[in-house]
Each structure stands twice: as C-alpha cells, then as structure tokens.
Amino acid sequence: MQGNIGHNKADDVEAYREMLARFKADADTVTEITEANAQFVRDHVGYGGKLAKEIDATRDEKKRPHLEAGRQIDGAYKPLIEECDKIIKGLKQKLAAFLDAREREAKRIADEAKRKLEEAERLAAKAAEEPEEDPFLAATAPTVDVKAAHVEAKIAEGQALAASRVSSAAGGFAATSLKTKRSAKVTHYATLIAHYAGRNEMKELALKLANADIRHAKGDAIEIPGVEIVEERVL
C-alpha cells in the first residue's frame, strides 16, 4: 500500500490520473481482508479520501475565476434580460385582454348571426309548408332571405375564429393568438398521490422521504407505513 497519496500537490490533470492509477493498482491487489492487512486497507481508504478531496479542491481553485467572471457577466446582462422579460409580460397581458374581449364580442356576433339564420330557415320552411292564401298578405309579407342569412353567418363565424389572432404590422414576426392553457389545481392531495403511486418518480420520492425520517430518528425506534427498517453495518 502506498502511503503518500494526498501529500503530493498536483495541479495537472494528467498528474492526478497517474496518482489515481497507482491508487487503483494498489487497491486491486487486495483480494481478501485479514488481520495482517486490515489496518493498511483502512489507511488506503483514508488516502483515497484525501486524494479525492485534493482533486476536488484543485478543480474548485481552477474553476473559481471562471465562475467569478461568469457571475460578473450575469450581473451585467441578466438585469437587462429580466427587465425586457418584465416589459414583454406586461404587453402580453394587455394584448391578451384585448384579444379576449375581441374574441368574446366576435363570438357574440357569430352566435346572433347563427340564431338569425336558424330563424330564417324556420320561417322559410314554414312558408313553404303553409303558403299564404291571401294575395295581399302574400305580397306584403316580409321576404325571408335564407341565402343572405347563411352568408352573414359564415362571415361572422370566420371573424370569430380570427378574432383571437393578431398579425405583425411590419411583417417581420409570426402572427400570435390566444391559446388555451391547461394546468392542474389540486383539490385532494392524498387522492392525487394515490393516483401516481405506481410511478417511479413517486416511488423514488417516497423512499427519499422515508430515509430522511429514518436519519432524523438518529437510531431511535421509528415506524413508517409500508417500510421495513433495514440495518447494516457500514464504514
């Protein structure tokens, strides 16, 4: 077992690779732990820990200037981006409110045009089934123009479909429109969790919470539904 791992200060990746290779080679010689080598193996574990810490410290030292430079760049530019996003969000809210109101009004007009078309079709059907026998009343009866009502309904329907859409004035941007956003509003967490109980993500989270509770118990007795407390001796 080598005894100088962690004492040679290396600042080069290749040097650390060589040190790690020697550490691994020594570790690979251990095939069985005996009274004769147990203490040496324990020391080798310690040397490995020191080596890992030294490598990580060097990594941090090498990376820190770049992180600081990155923080300075972020500090200069991120506030500008955030302010831009804030302005965009405000404009989007105003535009969405306008398009929503325009869409509602267009739908109201379309519904009214549809109602008038249905009424015109009803009156035309009635007139065909029950023609007016009095010549004067037949001549003076209001004309029911089903074709015109149908055209008006189709135009109103098209305008309603386009009401939530706004195009670019300059032509340099794609048109945008209102979209229906769907999201969950939890009404009963226990039912929701039970629904996803079979998902791996939920299982992993539950296991993480259980292990956290076990650690928090610090060796005291603890019961967790659906969990068996397993104890093992580790270094």
Image: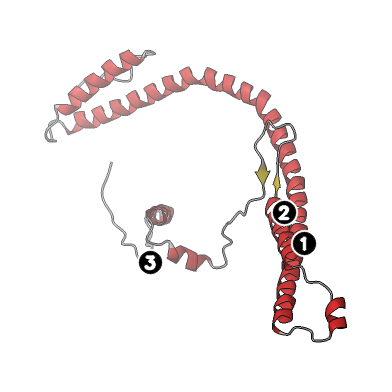
Q: Which residue is mark 1?
A: 109
Distance from Cα at disc 2 to Cα at disc 3:
59 Å
Number of numbered discs present? Answer: 3
In the shown orientation, is residue 47 left or right of residue 53? left
Residue at x 27%, y 21% (from the top left corner): 20
Q: Mark 2 and 3 residues: CB-CB less than 8 Å, in contact?
A: no
- Given residues 78 and 14, the one toward you in this image is 78
Amino acid type at mark 3: Pro
Q: Is residue 156 above or below residue 93?
A: below
In this rendering, the answer to whether 88 lies above or below 218 is: above
Displayed quadrant of residue 16: top left
Query: Looking at numbered disc 1 in the image, what kind of residue is underneath it?
Result: Ile
Which label was assigned to residue 225? 3
Task: Provide the residue designation for mark 2.
Answer: 159
Where is residue 180, by image quadrant? bottom right
Residue 88 location in percent, x, y? 72, 38
Q: Residue at x 88, y 82 (%)?
A: 136
Q: Nearer the viewer, mark 2 or mark 3?
A: 2
**Residue 13 x %, y %:** 35, 16
Which x, y percent locates residue 205? 42, 53
Dot 3: element: loop
Q: SS for tag 2?
A: helix
The secondary element bearing badge 1 is classed as helix
Residue at 22 percent of width and 19 percent of height = 22
N-terminal of the pair, mark 3 or mark 1, is 1
Mark 1 in CB contact with mark 2 (< 8 angstroms): yes
What is the x, y in percent for residue 101? 77, 55
Q: CA distance from mark 3 to mark 1?
A: 60 Å
Figure colour scheme: secondary structure
